[in-house]
Image (cartoon, rainbow, N blue to C red):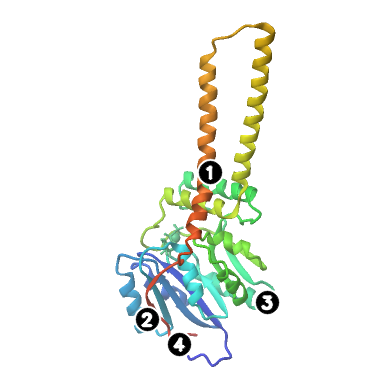
Amino acid sequence: MQNSGQKEILSIVVPVCNEEDTIQIFFDAIQEVSLDILVEFLFVDDGSTDGTLSLLRNLSKKNSAVSYISFSRNFGKDAAIYAGMKQSRGDFVAIMDVDLQDPPELLPEMLASVKTGKYDSVGTRRSNRSGEGRVRSWFSVQFYKLINKMSETQLVYGVRDFRVMNRQMVNGILQLCENQRFSKGIFAWVGFRTKYIPYENHKRVAGNSSWTFVELFKYAVEGIVSFSTVPLTIVALIGLITFFLSVMAGIFIVIRALVSNTSVAGWPSMVTIILFIGGLQMLSIGVIGRYLSAIFIESKHRPIYIAKEIHHSSRFIQ
Ligand code: UDP
Ligand code: MG
């Protein structure tokens, strides 16, 4: 059905990276959900190397409500979310993973809450972490604790990228043009009234998660560096305390030499102290280096993504 200009539109933004097995299943699952709104699909192909792009081309030919953007390479899920939001035309925008870990049956409830105007956004969070390794779970719990202690931007525990927003909030998010996009932090940083719905973790419907543990760790560090400068303060504090202690020790040694005239051959403790301070310095330089690299990357003002192929849907479905 063509948009008559009266009915509101929901844009469903779906980042996809090597997802040829899941896209059709996802698309069919969404059709099952009854949404009282016009819908456009916006798939963002994040540099897939499998048949994802040709599948999207076919899907858009068969269904005129399907748009897609295909990146020139892999720019990451957060860049894909940004690109999708930028291309979206809806009064409301939903962000969803394609692997059905974000249950489509929650969409009507989420949309209804935003439509009432009481909330600008409805987010989701996982109430459990079944289907995930213990070590991975432990690290992610620690990550939320750490970032909430260090940053003024508070993250809800287990928050997902799955959410529905109104146009106002989407436009707010699009104003943040940073390259290193930590979406969860950005969603929180822009403010607006947000409600969170908890749900049980689901397993991927097909295919594999493309995140390794190391990638997740890097992502966590990026999140902290993007939203907190507390590590810099801690490093500066440690430096100050160490400096103060060494001055005191120096004074003590001089006085002791003057008073008692005994020199102790204590080189093992000396080496330990040198190693300790050397280690601290390296650590501090490392922390500062992380911030420096963040500034370095942002200072280039590179685009967040480069699109190779864009297809706009001609119609919306109801
Ligand atoms: N994704 C993406 N770019 C990437 C990695 C993932 O667009 O570099 C997409 C992926 O296709 C999926 C969503 O992001 O739709 C979530 O990815 P995944 O299921 O691998 O992550 P997990 O659920 O394990 O956090
Ligand atoms: Mg997943």
User: Which amino acid, mark 3?
Assistant: Gly
Front disc: 3 or 1: 1
Location of residue 109 with respect to 17 vertically, above or below = below
- At mark 1, the secondary structure is helix
Mark 4 / mark 1, whichever is N-terminal? 1
Location of residue 156 with respect to 57 vertically, above or below = above
Would you say the residues marked 3 and 2 are in contact, meaning their CB atoms lie under 8 Å apart?
no
Q: Which residue is identified by label 3?
A: 117
Residue 119, image x and y in percent? Answer: 66, 71
Instruction: Give the spatial CA distance, label 3 vs label 2.
Output: 32 Å
Instruction: Give the spatial CA distance, label 3 vs label 1.
Output: 43 Å
Q: Residue furthest bottom?
A: 4
Q: Which residue is identified by label 1?
A: 287
Mark 4 / mark 3, whichever is N-terminal? 3
Task: Please tell me how crowded label 3 is: few (under 14), some (14-19), or many (20+) other residues with Cα within 10 Å.
Answer: few
Residue at the location (62% across, 62% down)?
A: 189
Mark 1 / mark 2, whichever is N-terminal? 2
Q: Nearer the viewer, residue 95 or 80?
A: 80
Q: Which residue is identified by label 2?
A: 60
Would you say the residues marked 4 and 3 are in contact, meaning their CB atoms lie under 8 Å apart?
no
Q: Residue furthest front?
A: 258
Q: Which residue is identified by label 4?
A: 315
Mark 3 / mark 1, whichever is N-terminal? 3
In the image, is 164 to the left or to the right of 134? right
